[in-house]
Image (cartoon, grey):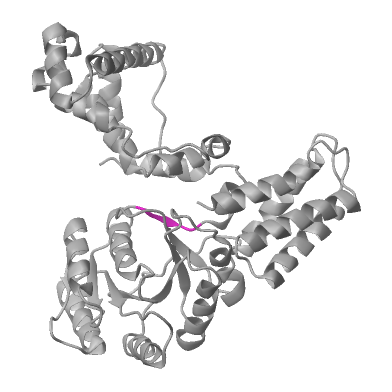
Amino acid sequence: MFENLSNKIEKALHTLRGKGSITDINVAETVKEVRKALLDADVSYPIAKAFTDKVKNEAIGRNVIHSIEPGQLMVKIVHEELTTLMGGASVDINIKGAPAIILIAGLQGSGKTTFSAKLAHHLKNKRGKRVMLAACDVYRPAAISQLQTLGEQINVPVFAEIGNQNPVDIANKAVHECKSKGYDVLIVDTAGRLAVDEEMMSEIARLKTELNPQETLFVVDSMTGQDAVNTAKAFNERIDYDGVVLTKLDGDTRGGAALTIRYTVDKPIKFVGVGEKMDALDVFHPDRMASRILGMGDVVSLVERAQEQYDEEEARRLQKKIIHNEYNFDDFLGQIAQIKKMGSMKDLMGMIPGMGKLTKNLEISDDAFVPIEAMIGSMTPYERQHPSCLNGSRKQRIANGSGRSIQELNRFLKQFDDTRKMMKMVSTKGAKLPKMPIKKR
C-alpha cells in the first residue's frame, strides 16, 4: 500500500538525519525531495507545492529540543501535514433511518458492486445491522448476477427485478421491501460508465432526488491517477456526495491522486478496499495512513483486526490445554484460520513498525500456510488430537498424502513441538490473559 510513495518520502527525509540542527538550507533540500516524491506519486503540482510549503514553514518555525534529532522532528511535521491533507480525522458513515439508504456511485470498473457487498458484510458483522442490497445497475451484463452471487457469499438478500430497465423504480420497490421486512440498511448499487457522461449523471441525480439517501458514497479506483480527482470533482458537482471510497489500494498504485481527493473536493474518505475478500474493507483513518506512508506502521489497526478475531472463551480453553500439554494440531489449525481472516500477510507485516521496510522487497505469499494445512489435513482425527502418536509409518503416510517430503514434515513437527514447549513455559509462569474490550461470541 503506497510503497513507492513511502520509499521516496523516506529517502527524502533521510537528508536531515545526522544533522545537528534544522537550517533553511537543509530543510529546503528535504522539502524539494518530498515534493518530487509527491509529484512522482501523481499528486498535482499545486497541491504538492502547497503541502511542502506548509512543511517548510512549520520546520523552520519550530525549535529542536535536545532529545529530538532534526530528522525525527521533520518526520513528525510531515506526518502531521499528511494527516491534515487526508482529512485530519476519520468520519463515520450515517446509518440512521428506517431503513438507512446508502447510494453507491462511480465509474464502471471502479469496484462499486464489490464494495457494495463488502459494505453490507461490514455493517452486518461489525455493526449488527440487517442489510439488504438493491441491484440497480441494469446496463452492465452480469451486474445483477454478480451482486446476487456476492450476496449469497455474505448471506445478505439482494433485491432485483430482471427485465426492469428503470433503476428508480427498482430502488423504490427495494425501499418498500426493506420497510415491510424490517431491514435496517439498504445499499443501492448503481450503474457506471467508462467515462462521465450526461446520461449517467442524470440517472444518478434522479436516484438521489427520489431516494433522498442518508449517505451517498463515491467509489473511485485508486489506480487511475489524476483522472480519479477529475471524476470525483465531476460527480461532486452533480450529486454532492457525502464521502469517498478508495478501492484497489492493495494494487500497484502510486496513490497520490487518491489521497488528494479529500483536499480537492473537501469530502472525507470513509473506506478503503484492501483486497478481494469480502472482509478486505477498512475504515479510513488519516493519521494511521500517514503513519504507514512514513514507514511507522499501524499498530492500532493491527490490534483492532486481532480483536475482531479474538474469542476470550476460546483463548482460555486453549490456555488450559497448553498448560496440560494437550495443545494439538486441530488447535493449531484454528489459530491459522484466525490469522488468515485478519488479511494478507504482507499487509499485516506492514502494520508492524519497521517491518514494512524490511519486507518491501520480499514476496510474502498468502499461501504460506498451505503446506502446513496439507500436512495436518493428511492426518487422521486421532493423529491431529494426539501429536505424540506419530511414528515412522504414520509420518510416511502423512508426507505422501500431503505431497511433501518426509524432511519437510519432520521440520514442521519439530517447529510445532518447540512452539508447544514455549507456549507452555509462558502459560505456566502465571501469565494472565489480557482483558480485551469486546463481547464474547
Query: In the rendering, at what x and y percent does residue 60 appear?
Result: 86, 54
User: On the picture, is 214 further left or further right than 60?
Assistant: left
Q: Is residue 171 above or below residue 57?
A: below
Query: Total of numbered circles in the picture?
Result: 0
Residue 62 seen in the current view: no
Q: Quadrant of the C terminus?
A: top left
Magenta segment range?
A: 280-284
Q: Within the magenta stretch, is there residue 407?
A: no
Main SS category, magenta section: strand
User: Residue 69 occupies which quadrant of the picture?
Assistant: top right
Q: Residue at x 53, y 40 (%)?
A: 360
Query: In the rendering, at what x and y percent does residue 191 appear?
Result: 31, 80
Q: Is residue 279 above or below residue 332?
A: below
Q: Nearer the viewer, residue 416 or 169?
A: 416
Q: Residue at x 17, y 67 (%)?
A: 148
User: On the picture, is 382 further left or further right than 441?
Assistant: left
Q: Residue at x 37, y 53 (%)?
A: 275
Query: In the rendering, at what x and y percent does residue 210 appear?
Result: 32, 90
User: Residue 335 occupies which quadrant of the picture?
Assistant: top left
Q: Residue at x 29, y 76 (%)?
A: 188
User: On the picture, is 7 further left or further right than 176?
Assistant: right
